[in-house]
């Protein structure tokens, strides 16, 4: 496998694991088997690539996932900057460890949308910090699930 298209993703079934790759953390989310609902899973602090990848692969296997949805941080003007390349590099290195379907999804405004929702819910600053990354991963994954159904 490699980086796949939306059409490729539509051809498969089963659980998807969503990743919001940040500079300090990874937010993780998971879909149900029917690909209707994305749920926040956890946030992991980034360490060495090998440790991060091993953690993600363990969750992938434990949940019998059939693919990864990775948020791609495209700039607001549609251009690709250093963060976009960093995520692409992460995916390339990840695919060297395990040949799994990886779908990249434009994650513009995901963190902002999730943060706005938490503020509207009057969530404390501490709770927002603890939850923003996994909720952003869930938001990204839900966007893909919704697109797959349309």
Image: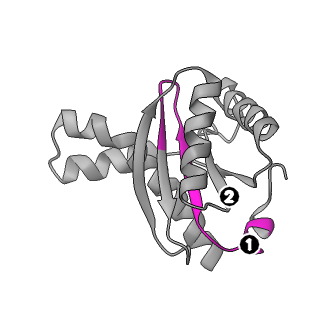
Is residue 112 positioned above or below 30 on the image? above
Q: Is residue 42 left or right of residue 102?
A: left
State the extent of the magenta-drawn residues as a range.
Answer: 8-27
Numbered label attached to residue 67: 2
Q: Are marks 1 and 2 in contact (CB under 8 Å)?
A: yes
Structural distance between the alpha carbons of marks 1 and 2: 9 Å
Q: Residue at x 80, y 66 (%)?
A: 8
Is residue 45 positioned above or below 9 on the image? above
| Number of other residues with Cα within 10 Å of mark 1, as a class: few under 14, some 14 to 19, many 20 or more | few
Res 75 quadrant in image:
top right
- Percent position of residue 56, x then y: 57, 42
Q: Residue at x 15, y 39 (%)?
A: 124
Q: Quadrant of the C terminus?
A: bottom right
Q: Secondary structure beneath disc 1?
A: loop
| Number of other residues with Cα within 10 Å of mark 2, as a class: few under 14, some 14 to 19, many 20 or more | many
Q: Of the residues under marks 1 and 2, which one precedes in the sequence? A: 1
Res 103 quadrant in image:
bottom right
Instruction: Residue 146: say if magenta.
Output: no
Q: Secondary structure beneath disc 2?
A: strand
């Amino acid at each position: 496998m490699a980086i796949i298209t939306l059409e490729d993703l539509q051809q498969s079934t089963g659980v998807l694991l969503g990743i919001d790759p940040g500079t300090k953390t990874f937010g993780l989310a998971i879909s149900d088997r029917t690909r209707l609902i994305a749920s926040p899973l956890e946030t992991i602090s980034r360490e060495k690539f090998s440790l991060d990848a091993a953690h993600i692969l363990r969750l992938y296997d434990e949940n019998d996932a059939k693919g990864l949805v990775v948020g791609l941080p495209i700039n607001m003007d549609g251009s690709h900057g250093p963060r976009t390349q960093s995520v692409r590099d992460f995916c390339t290195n990840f695919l060297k460890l395990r040949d799994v379907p990886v779908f990249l999804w434009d994650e513009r405004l995901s963190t902002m949308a999730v943060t706005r929702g938490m503020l509207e819910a009057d969530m404390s600053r501490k709770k927002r910090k603890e939850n923003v990354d996994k909720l952003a991963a869930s938001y990204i994954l839900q966007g893909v699930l919704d697109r797959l159904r349309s």
